[in-house]
Amino acid sequence: MKPSRSFASDNNAVVHPEVMEAIARVNQGHAVGYGDDPQTDSAVRKFREHFGERVEVFFVFNGTAANCLSLQALTQPYHAVLCSEISHIYTDECGAPERLTGCKLLPLAAAVGKLTVETVSHAYHGIGDQHHVQPKVISITQTTEMGTIYRTAEVEALSRFAHDRDMFLHMDGARISNAAVAQGLTLRQATRDLGVDVLSFGGTKNGVMGAEAVVFFRPQLARNFLFTRKQGMQLASKMRYLSVQMEALLTDDLWRRNAEHANRMAKLLEQEIKKIKNAKIVYPVEANGVFAKIPRDAVAKIQERYFFYVWNEEESVVRWMCSFDTTEEDVRQFAAFVRDGR
Amino acid sequence: MKPSRSFASDNNAVVHPEVMEAIARVNQGHAVGYGDDPQTDSAVRKFREHFGERVEVFFVFNGTAANCLSLQALTQPYHAVLCSEISHIYTDECGAPERLTGCKLLPLAAAVGKLTVETVSHAYHGIGDQHHVQPKVISITQTTEMGTIYRTAEVEALSRFAHDRDMFLHMDGARISNAAVAQGLTLRQATRDLGVDVLSFGGTKNGVMGAEAVVFFRPQLARNFLFTRKQGMQLASKMRYLSVQMEALLTDDLWRRNAEHANRMAKLLEQEIKKIKNAKIVYPVEANGVFAKIPRDAVAKIQERYFFYVWNEEESVVRWMCSFDTTEEDVRQFAAFVRDGR
Amino acid sequence: MKPSRSFASDNNAVVHPEVMEAIARVNQGHAVGYGDDPQTDSAVRKFREHFGERVEVFFVFNGTAANCLSLQALTQPYHAVLCSEISHIYTDECGAPERLTGCKLLPLAAAVGKLTVETVSHAYHGIGDQHHVQPKVISITQTTEMGTIYRTAEVEALSRFAHDRDMFLHMDGARISNAAVAQGLTLRQATRDLGVDVLSFGGTKNGVMGAEAVVFFRPQLARNFLFTRKQGMQLASKMRYLSVQMEALLTDDLWRRNAEHANRMAKLLEQEIKKIKNAKIVYPVEANGVFAKIPRDAVAKIQERYFFYVWNEEESVVRWMCSFDTTEEDVRQFAAFVRDGR
Amino acid sequence: MKPSRSFASDNNAVVHPEVMEAIARVNQGHAVGYGDDPQTDSAVRKFREHFGERVEVFFVFNGTAANCLSLQALTQPYHAVLCSEISHIYTDECGAPERLTGCKLLPLAAAVGKLTVETVSHAYHGIGDQHHVQPKVISITQTTEMGTIYRTAEVEALSRFAHDRDMFLHMDGARISNAAVAQGLTLRQATRDLGVDVLSFGGTKNGVMGAEAVVFFRPQLARNFLFTRKQGMQLASKMRYLSVQMEALLTDDLWRRNAEHANRMAKLLEQEIKKIKNAKIVYPVEANGVFAKIPRDAVAKIQERYFFYVWNEEESVVRWMCSFDTTEEDVRQFAAFVRDGR
């Protein structure tokens, strides 16, 4: 029998019971559509509790939209976005960022998934030259696509670099909760306080049903975002059902509990995998992802039972993600299967 | 005390309990993301039961997207979309259709909300002239924005007109269930059998939490829609939670029960309003919407207690929508308040 | 034998000899490309002589581009452009403005081709409403597509209306020279002094080979226009050959001489046509265009010899344009042919 | 005194006298606008003489447009274009291709400027995966941006690779004449016969004033190009003045004479530079460009007198282009100045 939970992605998980309850709770009476409802107000207030006053918050359906609309709010079509060559926005959005913004995304090499001031410096050129796209945004992913974490000083250095050049720092925070928790930081400390201008705050990979937030730390950048979101096809009519998910995530530290658990399961998985001959952990396990190099035939065999993605076909590196609903037993059974093939 | 339900819009309603239960039911174990899950397969099969074999179905988050992506699948940027000047796509999407498709929407006058062969004929010109956008799609809304219904012969005439000219017929079916029910038709009889090429099938206004479907009746039109949806920022990672909503709507005729009830409440409201001096029903009440002309000061007074939209400011016409959760008591209390101001 | 000159359009004319000579004059030695050449500097200075200090000028290839790029410089994709329903940008650009800017163009009724404060007021609504495109630009054509002219007070009223609402006034000046001359105004008096923010200054219809200018009267609006033009595929590498055309047009009042002549020929044509029974002038002849209603079979007969466009098929109204190279003899022969059919 | 001709770019050159004469010749009488004129017919026939029957030809203003509109004709927005990381379309168009087509351009490493089957194979992946842009076009530049030339077998291999995978081969032929001449090929042998699907045929860098052609070798690809060009703001009203330039270029082998001369001057320059200590030719001189590594201070010194571009700042490599109007004396004087600094 196939196991009920896999290690393919944190978005394969269920919806957390507290989120389900919150949805059920608001499911009574009529509410005005499109965000003019009490639940949305309340959810926005929750964001201000966590991120501080004067943040502007907009809920959207998914991470693609959170990222693309964030970038649109920061750019004109002749701008460039500097990002890692393995960033989700560069490799996994079917060209949505370019299509929506008109901008070019400049892919930069990124050891263990992270941009550095050095790499972005190299791509910062052609300023004022009409033939060249003009760098305007640095976009980083936290945690990175390789499961690693930008340290606070690293983010600060990038935001300083950006702001010194009239550029913005965008953070794709699909897994920002995992990164904050891993470093013992509050959400604000992990984002706003480091100079991030706009954050795609991830919910879907951390226990909600389907909701993300675009969080502006400089309100003037959000001035026209209502129109950008609507024209970007991301305005929910029954908004309360999105808002309440996000409110639940920020209530009683659910965001932290979920992320902590997922990170802990990844650590456990790392330990178990390390015991296995022929399996090698290839990137530091800093949050909820484990990347391992295993023999090609072993991959095929494990995939017969467990669904997951091969990260690098050529080098036979696989990606295993833990989520808030991963259990210790899930991990041990999986590791045993990896080890013994049964 | 304010009433818990208003007559502002069918998207102010709650989520139907059967939909909530269906969501709860799938909330266990991991599921592969992005649509490769059993619930999505099952939901698509349900659509084929209702609409017939060889339809292609794609779930998206909202009606704006269902419409815009449908149009993108049918057009090139130099094409024109013929639509009513009061159509939702023309007036209420903040320009999303033009922005996404690059096309021009040609607004046509439409008595009681309906395009006719005569009006579209008038707009069909400049064919082959490089200076002119080329008409490629007729888009109609069913039920119309005025609460009226295209009769089957009317839709057939428009699809014939379109197909004779290498054009497509798109139906914005945000309220197609209300239209089908009102005419005693199955969903297939109300759409595919009349020559509609692509349907935006509405769920959100008929009892689900937030989901719409793009339904292609000619599979070859859907060939690249996976990419169009993803690049259009409308691919849900936890897709099962969208799919199951739609499946529930098509199970045990929930779509029909909900729409029938809403339509019946509108009829009741019409009857009650007709008894009121100074209130005048201005469009035929054929589905779940009631449009009434009432004195300006009366509007203001009613809005103190009930939230709803003024349809035509100059003529003081208001729009009242009924939904699946509107009760007879809601209607009678509301009508009494309209009549007596208390 | 067919006549060598027709009355189809002022862009059917040749290149004025003074422009040809200017081109020949710069055709020696190498010049740096893309606008960093002495001829371009010199041409820009000419524009400043005519329009005053602190105007920013950019040369582009054609009128479509001058208009579309002007609008892009003034808008974001969720904005709306208010224009006449017969404006060139609305009817004759194959949707280029919408495609390039992402904006919706709102077509307004326009008696004798002119927008008024009243008509634009009517379209100015939905401000701040996320569902509605936000009006940002009023675009007027001078002379209008009907050959009429906005009076200075009319333009001023529109610019006041725009500026009071944080909007811009754009002028499609494909035939601005004809309008200025007809009113005895300098180019500056006919544009900048009336509150126009950005002007598409027409050259091609007034004797050059193919060149238009985008003229910004508020320099800050031009800040990023170098990039907008380049990304808009309108940056000429051998720019000197465009610049010198425009310089020639502004030298020794060639723009005025050409426009005056064309206007005078239209007046002559009007006089001749007025003598003809069965022909009726339908719009005031204020610049270089003559619109006449003539019997349908007469149209066909004249077109056997002379190429021109039918303006309104249903009403059998034709458009005849005069240009700088139209001669009195051309006019008299043509009028005679209209009258006698030979 | 500064020399009248530099080595900065072949677009710094004048217009060839035969082109000027051709323009003067058509400068009489009226001609219908937008391409319905005898000169355009005649120019298109010339293209068919050179490239064979059943090619479709469209004239546009510049190379940016020829490339971008070609790509638009071949793609949908979710497609990818494979190109060299130093290709003009990737580095020097201010993002115009992405903006116009919506596609992602995938930059590939390219030794001496050339793509190979091996490099494009590596980028051909993710087929059918909705998260990935779908490769649809391989775009090569002939001659390359490094002055090198794809051999016929190399082009054939790429076109075979493309066609085997339902992809297209686009050639940016800004300098296709130089490449054909260098290999002793006709224009057809250098393009169509090798499997190129669409060619941007360059005129501006080979002696005309400003005109390029988009040449379709498979007519069905051109079916809607009239609209694409117009909506792309590239339709000239006084088209005859573009057409006649291209006709002149293809008459009496002017394209060949100009390119041959430019190539010969580059060979001469190479010989002269090779004699200079401290100067090193870095790429094979196969057409009209010479790339040399010279000391940084020498660059500065030469640029005081001659304008040209530094190709690679870090490695102090400069680019010198020869054109049809470069004289032997120009070359010898320049080489002497490089050698002696006077």
Image (cartoon, coloured by chain):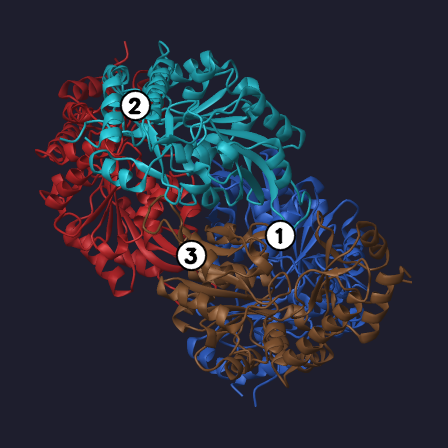
Chain colours: A brown, B blue, C red, D cyan
- In this view, the residue in front, A115 or B57, is A115
**Residue C40 placed where, x, y %?**
20, 38
- SS for callout 1: helix
Chain ID of residue with mark 3: A
Query: In the rendered view, does D134 fall on the left or right side of A129?
Result: right
- Residue at the disc numbered 1: B229
How far is mark 2 from mark 1, CA to CA?
44 Å
Question: Looking at the picture, which amino acid does disc 1 mark?
Answer: Arg
- SS for callout 3: helix
Question: Looking at the picture, which amino acid does disc 3 mark?
Answer: Ser
**Residue D242 placed where, x, y %?**
33, 24
Q: Are marks 1 and 3 on the same chain?
A: no
Query: In the rendered view, does A73 fall on the left or right side of C187?
Result: right
Chain ID of residue with mark 2: D
- In this view, the residue in front, A119 or B255, is A119
Number of the front mark, 1 or 3: 3
User: In the drawing, what numbered circle is on residue D241?
Assistant: 2
Pointer 3: residues within 10 angstroms few (<14), some, or many (20+)?
Answer: few
In the rendered image, the vertical position of residue B307 relative to residue B100, given as above or below: below
